[in-house]
Amino acid sequence: MLLWAGCAPLGQSAPAPSAGAAEVGQEWQPVADPAALGYSRAGLDSALAMAQGMKTSALLVAVGGRTLLEYGDVRDTSYIASARKSVLSMLYGKYVENGTIRLDETLAQIGIDDRGGLLPLERTATVEDLLGARSGVYHPASNPGDALEMAPARGTQKPGTYNLYSNWDFNALGTIFEVRTGRGIYDAFESDIARPIGLQDFHREVHSRQGDSTKSIHPAYHFVLSTRDMARLGQLMLQNGRWGGRQVIPESWVRRSTRMVTPPAEMNPPGLRAQSLRDGVGYGFLWWTRVRPDTTDAFHGSYAAQGAFGQYIWVIPRLDMVIAHKVVVRGSPTAEQNVSQAQFEALVRSIVSARCEAVAAGAAPSRPASPRRGGQPAACHFAVPPFTAQWGPAPPDWRVAAGAVPAVFFAGDYEMAPGRVFKVTVENGILMGEPAGGARQPLVHVSGVTFGLGRADAPVTLTFTLAANPPAPAVVMGENGTERTLPRVGGGR
């Protein structure tokens, strides 16, 4: 299914966006005329063609509570991966406000421990530290998909001082919620959020907490949701937690949970920090936050839930917009079943450009896109730089002829020993290394053109060099004080 808005019947006026159109009935209603909000149909067609060319399973874009774009089967339910964490953040609001959950309580006070025991320092971490992914607890998690492999040594970071994306934090927050409220996560979600806002495809019976209990006693809390219900959750957040005259999530919690706790310059590990600095991405209370230096940027103040393989809920207040995106993943997912963050952001830029280009061409909207801004039209400028490979906090100033050498120039296979290669790739602008027999992981910037494997102080480092006449890349591997050049054997540019 591929559509942009149809027209309302003659003589029937569509409600203004401020009426909360998603609340009017069970079904999402289309925007009657995209041009009335300043969106060009040609631009929207271009954005949807982009979605068709990716692994996107479904897409729903809402403006003012009405559907601007819809693609794919938005009713199909599937795993939303790490977007689940933002859903838990939404659940926390009510219980933080009424005092059932205290943000300043420590793990020791709540009685949270784990296999083999937490360290005394780790048990001083507070609920607030875990919500901001700054716990300093680096105990193994019951499920993969985080940055724990690149964590500092246990007991070296004081809680609250060091950001690291850790499933242990997120899963323990699920346990804390259930311990303090006396309610299961899914039962609470059904009664506190799903029913009040009319989720159409939520089925309580398919949900259960899961994980490897031999690693951690705190299981994950995966959610199975449809794209249209993901959009409804985003719309609830956009409306400051209010739905149909009822305050479902405290407004103060919506503001607090989506406020940046960790700015881009403090994100870890360093490879993620470089990407965060480039895109203006930080972290709040289980929400990814966006702050651009240019305050006229349409994305400034936006925030997102995001999960592996392409699960996204992006809330853009300046445009009164919610974007829900899904890649349906069932069984054993593969790399081919994926829409990367860079691809998704390119799609979002294309959607926003459909309005920006129309307004720039003089097609001013007949009414403001968002009455929440007091009648002021939405900002149309967005200062997102092109997606290019980055080399940690400070890209080296290498030159070949008149152009800078991009990191992707070094992507390829390098021989470690006969029959054993080290693969270098670039994913979402970040250098990745995969040694023979090892797992692929981000390369950590040490200094200049030197990178470590796993940690900046790791015993194995790589130095990228460039030979001239003709220009050719080389990788020097240092291992326990011994260096050797790895000859390139193919797979590069």
Image (cartoon, helix red, strand yellow):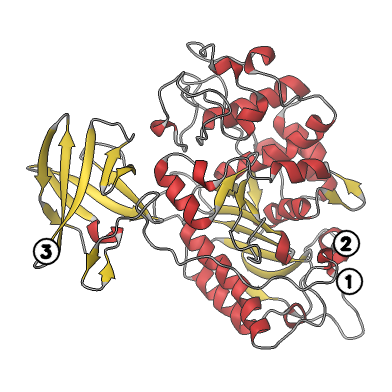
Q: Nearer the viewer, mark 2 or mark 1?
A: 1
- Up the image or down, 25 lies above or below 375; here it is above
Vertical comparison of 38 with 256: above or below:
below
Label 3 CA crowd tier, 10 Å (few <14, some 14–19, many 20+):
few
As shown in the figure, which amino acid type bears the numbered disc 2? Answer: Val
Q: Are marks 2 and 1 in contact (CB under 8 Å)?
A: yes
Percent of width and height locating residue 364: 74, 84
Tell me the tag on residue 468. Answer: 3
Taking depth in this image into account, of 424 and 142 the one nearest to the observer is: 424
Label 2: state its secondary structure.
helix
On the rendered image, what quadrant is the C terminus found in?
bottom left
Circle 1 is placed at which residue position? Answer: 15
Query: Can you give x and y, in whole percent of width and height, for residue 357 in the image?
Result: 61, 81
For marks 2 and 3, give the CA distance.
66 Å
Which residue, given by chain and number where applicable, does mark 2 sit on?
A: 24
Q: How far from the left and from the top, in percent, is residue 451?
A: 28, 43
Q: Are marks 3 and 1 in contact (CB under 8 Å)?
A: no
Residue name at image x 65 percent, y 62 percent: 295
User: What residue is shown at x 75% (from left), y 46% (from top)?
Assistant: 255
Rendering coords of residue 345 (x, y %): 53, 62
Dot in front, 3 or 1? 3
Q: Earlier in the sequence, mark 3 or mark 1?
A: 1
Quarter assignment of residue 283: top right
The residue lying at 65 percent from left, 66 percent from top is 298
The residue under the point 45% across, 67% down is 386
